[in-house]
Image (cartoon, rainbow, N blue to C red):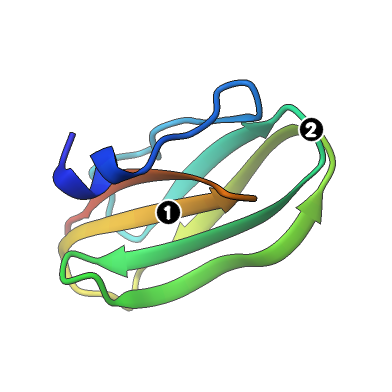
Amino acid sequence: MTNIESQYSLSADRFSISQNYPNPFNSYTIIEYELKEKATVNIDIYDILGRRVETLLAESIQPPGRYSIIWKAGDYPSGIYLYIIRIGEDRAIRRCLLLK
């Protein structure tokens, strides 16, 4: 776990997140998560320098259930990216590798 990842923890009783797949990926990857209760969800993509490059979900209110979202990254350069899922005050961070 990196320093950034260790700063945030997720509440397993509120939601869970899976590692994106495929990873590494070429043009797109799938991010899956599960909500245990109704929640407001935000998903942002950051480059390795910490710059937000894309917002996949912003303030989306979702009922309990399993969800997946596709990040189409074909316009971005190869590299390591972080995706941060915020659900209320809880956050989870995962790394993904884009290879072209």
* In the foreground, 76 or 19: 19
Residue 66, x across and y down, in percent: 70, 32
Q: Check residue 37 in the rendering and tell me which mark sits there, or answer none.
A: 2
The front one of 93 and 26 is 93
Q: Camera-side residue: 9 or 32?
A: 9
Return the mark for residue 2: none
Tell me: 99 left or right of 29: left
Q: Residue at x 36, y 46 (%)?
A: 93
Q: Would residue 16 appear left or right of 6 to someone viewing this image?
A: right
Quarter of the image with the C terminus in it: bottom left
From the viewer's perspective, is 86 left or right of 19? Answer: right
Residue beneath label 1, please? Answer: 84
Quarter holding residue 16: top right
User: Label 1, label 2: how many angstroms apart (C-alpha)?
Assistant: 19 Å
Identified at 30% across, 55% down, the residue is 82
- Amino acid type of the residue tagged 2 in the rendering: Glu
Residue 24 lies left or right of residue 73; in this view the side is left
Type of amino acid at the residue the image marks with label 1: Ile
Mark 2, Cα crowd under 10 Å, few <14 / some 14-19 / many 20+, is few
Q: Residue 59 at x, y = what percent?
A: 70, 65
